[in-house]
């Protein structure tokens, strides 16, 4: 009996001293803590690191993992103090302005696939006008497209492509999401199971599709979003609301919920939209879009060529019927 109890004592002692270090959550919290610190989220970093250390409270004080976590905690606390001091200095200095980073430090997060006209990129790094000397931009740039101009960008973070023309302002954030301030856009992906988040001044929408997709997105005057599905089955989600739209359907994302769905003629859109026609090279999905437009025309007996404009509220839209010549 004593021998058995002794065995249990050694077994549980080994767990308390060493078993917890094998817990994958320790390394997970440790890595999350370091990542949060790198992003400047020091409070969140310390929360993760203390969670990791909690698993090792009963381990030896000389255990390598415990030493590494405690060292990282000291580093993060030091960085946090420095950051708070710098913030106070900025607040007290009315002439302070964050200095842009060198262009040599800008990473190739976003690929410029084609452009024309005048495109400006500001913030984070030194301001530039896009030209043939560079084929990439970094995340978090504020990109401004001037009238009679356009740009197409490949977002490496989520394997999606964005193109916009004729006056627009937007940011592709570090997490790869789209922050659209003004303008109209075409967003598409040739990958399956793709998901993105689109933000406008007064609306946030999660967009996902199990198949390759293409859609148009416009920022409305009330700060919402106008979304037109061109290809694929698109699922739209926001807090407490979700909806699915198929090719040829339009919907408005309003500050609260979605509007009713509307149908439009894809063949008319292909002719009237500069997003599809103004670039030197058409979008990769253009051939499939033409096929989709033909299928839609065959299914519809009576059609009116219309252009959908802005939105006033959930039930009122600007609609212009194009007269036959």
Image (cartoon, helix red, strand yellow):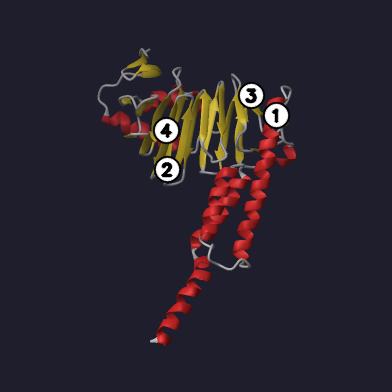
Sequence-first tag of 2 and 3 = 3
Q: CA distance from mark 3 to mark 1?
A: 37 Å
- Vertical relation: 18 (above or below) 243: below
Q: Are marks 2 and 3 in contact (CB under 8 Å)?
A: no
Q: CA distance from mark 2 to mark 1?
A: 47 Å
Q: CA distance from mark 2 to mark 3?
A: 29 Å
Q: CA distance from mark 2 to mark 4?
A: 18 Å
Mark 2 sits on what residue?
212
Q: Secondary structure at mark 2?
A: loop
Disc 4: CA contacts within 10 A as few (<14), some (14-19) or many (>=20): many
Residue 53: name its quadrant. bottom right
Between 116 and 49, the one lying in front of the other is 49
Mark 4 sits on what residue?
205
**In this rendering, does residue 164 appear at all?**
yes
Residue depicted at x 35% and y 27%: 257
Q: Which mark is residue 135?
A: none
Q: Secondary structure at mark 3?
A: loop
The mark lying in front, picked from 4 and 1, is 1
Q: Are marks 3 and 4 in contact (CB under 8 Å)?
A: no
Residue depicted at x 57% and y 48%: 45
Q: Secondary structure at mark 1?
A: helix
Disc 1: CA contacts within 10 A as few (<14), some (14-19) or many (>=20): some
Sequence-first tag of 3 and 4 = 3
Disc 3: CA contacts within 10 A as few (<14), some (14-19) or many (>=20): some
The mark lying in front, picked from 3 and 1, is 1
Task: Please state if 237 lies on the left or on the right of 166 as rendered.
Answer: left
Sequence-first tag of 4 and 1 = 1
Mark 3 sits on what residue?
117
Sequence-first tag of 2 and 4 = 4
Residue depicted at x 57% and y 25%: 169
Task: Please state if 76 lies on the left or on the right of 260 as rendered.
Answer: right
């Amino acid at each position: 009996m004593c021998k058995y109890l002794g065995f249990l004592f050694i077994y549980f002692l080994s767990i308390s001293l060493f078993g917890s270090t094998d817990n994958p959550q320790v390394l997970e919290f440790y890595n999350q803590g370091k990542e949060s610190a790198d992003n400047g989220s020091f409070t969140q970093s310390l929360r993760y690191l203390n969670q990791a250390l909690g698993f090792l409270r009963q381990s030896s004080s000389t255990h390598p993992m415990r030493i590494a976590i405690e060292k990282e905690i000291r580093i993060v606390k030091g960085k946090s103090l420095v950051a708070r001091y710098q913030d106070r200095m900025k607040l007290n200095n009315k002439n302070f302005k964050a200095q842009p980073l060198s262009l040599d430090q800008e990473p190739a997060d976003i690929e410029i696939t084609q452009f024309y006209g005048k495109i400006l990129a500001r913030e984070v790094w030194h301001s530039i006008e896009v030209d043939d000397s560079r084929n990439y931009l970094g995340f978090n740039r504020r990109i401004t497209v001037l009238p009679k101009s356009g740009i197409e960008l490949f977002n490496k973070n989520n394997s999606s492509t964005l193109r916009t023309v004729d006056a627009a302002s937007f940011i592709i954030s570090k997490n790869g999401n789209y922050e659209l301030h003004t303008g109209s856009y075409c967003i598409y992906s040739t990958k399956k199971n793709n998901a993105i988040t689109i933000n406008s001044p007064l609306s946030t929408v999660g967009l996902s599709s199990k198949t390759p997709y293409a859609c148009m997105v416009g920022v409305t005057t009330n700060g919402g979003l106008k979304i037109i599905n061109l290809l694929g089955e698109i699922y739209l989600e926001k807090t407490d609301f979700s909806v699915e739209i198929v090719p040829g359907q339009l919907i408005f994302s309003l500050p609260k919920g979605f509007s009713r769905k509307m149908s439009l003629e894809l063949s008319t859109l292909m002719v009237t939209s500069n997003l599809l026609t103004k670039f030197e090279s058409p979008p990769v999905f253009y051939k499939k879009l033409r096929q989709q437009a033909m299928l839609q025309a065959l299914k519809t007996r009576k059609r009116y060529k219309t252009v959908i404009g802005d939105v006033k509220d959930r039930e009122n839209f600007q609609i212009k019927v194009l007269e036959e010549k």
